[in-house]
Amino acid sequence: MFSLLGGLAQSVRSLSDENAQEKIPSLLESEEANILAEPLEKIREHKSVLKVMAKLEKELQTIRKKHEKMKEKERDLLLQKEEKLSKAQEHQKTHIVKNHSKLVKKGSGIDVQLLKRKSEAGLVAMSVDHQTKLEELQKVHSQTLMSLTKELYKAELELYDRYQEPLYSAIEKSLLTSQAAQMEHLKSLHD
């Protein structure tokens, strides 16, 4: 009797093994139904998102180009002021040298060494004054450039803020479109 039960259990097991081998995989187990969410990088490549990003980038380029023109204008202005300062220094230097030469030629009883020291002192004072003015000019230029850079940063930030809502709306629309397409695919598999 025990062998009869053992043989029956054996044949039931072999029948279930045969059914398992013949079993067709369910639709849910198929590769076709294995749908993954679309990655954010792919969503950002959708036409509506790219369109908003292109508008944003175009406006950013416009702002940056305007900023570069302003910086270039400031550089040119600095160069002009430096050149003007150098010409003024040369003019003063020439004037001091001429005065020294005139006084030496006149020989008006003034000690030549004293005249030479006065001329040299005048040249040194003029050189120090020129250097101070030049440093002040460069300091003002640096502050102006820093101010321009801050303005650019603020303008870019405002632009990003202005485009934030349209960009996220476009991404959301693309996401919903992607989800709808995946749902349609699943429905077609189900039917």
Image (cartoon, rainbow, N blue to C red):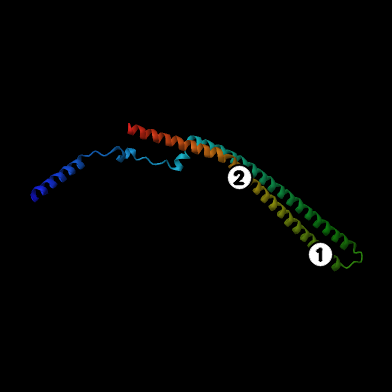
Q: Residue at x 46, y 42 (%)?
A: 41
> Which of the pair 15/183 is nearer the observer?
15
Query: What residue sits right under mark 1 in the picture?
Result: 121
Residue 130, image x and y in percent? 76, 57
Q: Nearer the viewer, residue 44 or 81?
A: 44
For image coordinates 76% across by 56% down, the residue present is 133
Q: Quadrant of the C terminus?
A: top left
Q: Is residue 53 visible?
A: no
Residue placed at 69% from the left, 52% from the top?
A: 143
Q: Amino acid at mark 1?
A: Ala
SS assignment at label 2: helix
Crowd rating for badge 2 (residues with CA inside 10 Å; few <14, some 14–19, many 20+):
few
In the image, taking residue 160 as reference, residue 71 lies left or right, namely right
Q: Is residue 146 left or right of residue 112?
A: left
- Say if mark 1 contacts mark 2, CB within 8 Å: no
Secondary structure of residue under mark 1: helix
- In the image, which disc is placed on residue 157? 2
Residue 177 sits in which quadrant?
Answer: top left
